[in-house]
Image (cartoon, rainbow, N blue to C red):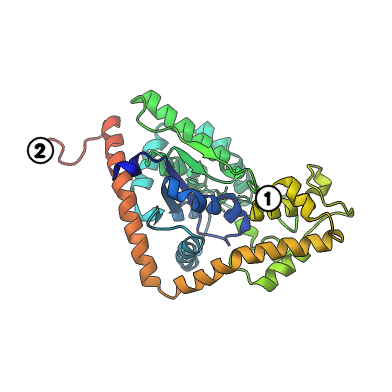
Amino acid sequence: MSSEQSSKKRVFSGIQPTGNIHIGNYLGAVRNWVIHQKEKENFFCIVDLHSLTVKQDPDELRRQTRSLAAILLASGIDPSASTLFIQSHVAAHAEGCWLLNCVTPIGWLQRMTQFKDKSVQQETISAALLDYPVLQAADIILYDAHEVPVGEDQKQHVELSRDIAQRFNHLYEHEFFVVPEPVIPKSAARVMGLDDPTAKMAKTYAHVRGHAVRLLDEPDEIMYVFKRAVTDSGREIRFSDDPERAGVNNLLEIYKAVTSKTPEEVERDFADARGYGDLKVRVAEVVIEMVNPIRERYKTLMEDPAKLDRLLAIGAEQAAAVSVPKLAEMKRIMGLVLPGESR
Ligand code: AMP
Ligand code: TRP
């Protein structure tokens, strides 16, 4: 590693390959990875093992994993600045999870909002669903990541990763793991569903027409979905935290994030709008402009799956170069005998 690289802050983030990636994922997370990648040392991980915590169709999971890799590259993740890899390619994550399980009180996991939300949706709750945040902690802390750029919904999980890192440090060796910080964007940290602005836009519902704008949607579809977005019976186009006006607020938030304008500039842009119809069309237009080049680059990347696989293999190698030695040191600290240690 060059000295220039080592002086940069280390970033780790992850995204599940299942469900349809939407503008909430992009604006809340992926775009921020791309924007800051040159200033940091980055690890971006397609967390296929996390997807397995709920039932998946094996063929579909395989297809979506490759497709997500292409979407991330098409979104601007640059392999010369960032390590992009598939979680299951680096066995240290699953092993690290086991070791961290041994220092994590079960009560910490039972309190997690996502566990409570997801478990009511399942017929059978897997042990892995409860354990989900411990694997996430392993992802992050095996890389000694300082920063974890995520949307608002992941704040609790990153805070748990902090708690786990601190507990390990306290139990075994002071300052062994870097204690990571969540980095939540100022705009679009929580993009809401277009069909229901009181619920977060979610990958699992992105197949329901009208709920989300998916990154690969064609312009006609995006326009259709925005035109049908739920608003209210008023006319005023202003930011507001009134739950009754959450639909309009969500549209303005999306516009603000896409254009990187201030709230005042955004409201000024709509001062001449003729009602919500106008607002919806203009928001759709800026979103279409944002996603068009991503969709085109995606199509090109998917034409060469062998190249994609090569990039992911290099990514896994680079990731393992960091996490495998860290895991070995962790094992030693915990009292495990390393293979060939006495030789
Ligand atoms: P996931 O879809 O759970 O794999 O999330 C991938 C990333 O997108 C995480 O950083 C999430 O916090 C972020 N994210 C997911 N949904 C939203 C949303 N509706 N608004 C903003 N960020 C989101
Ligand atoms: N749980 C995260 C989500 O659903 C994905 C994730 C897994 C992650 N490991 C991570 C995010 C490590 C940040 C860092 O969005």
Picture quadrant where residue 225 is located: bottom right
Mark in the foreground, 1 or 2: 1
Q: Is residue 104 above or below residue 53?
A: above
Q: Is residue 229 above or below residue 180?
A: below
Judging depth in this view, the residue of 163 and 58 nearest the camera is: 163
Q: Is residue 44 left or right of residue 252?
A: left
The reply to whether residue 198 is in sight is no
Judging depth in this view, the residue of 178 and 275 nearest the camera is: 275
The image quadrant where one finds the N terminus is top left
**Disc 1, SS:** loop
Reading the image, the residue beneath label 2 is 343
Residue 86 drawn at (x, y percent): 40, 56
Q: Amino acid at mark 2?
A: Arg
Residue 249 drawn at (x, y percent): 76, 49
Find the residue positioned furthest to the left.
343
Residue 144 drawn at (x, y percent): 38, 38
Q: Residue at x 78, y 42 (%)?
A: 241
Q: CA distance from mark 1 to mark 2?
A: 62 Å
Q: Amino acid at mark 1?
A: Lys
Picture quadrant where residue 213 is located: bottom right
Reading the image, the residue beneath label 1 is 261
Residue 282 drawn at (x, y percent): 75, 63
Q: Residue at x 56, y 43 (%)?
A: 154
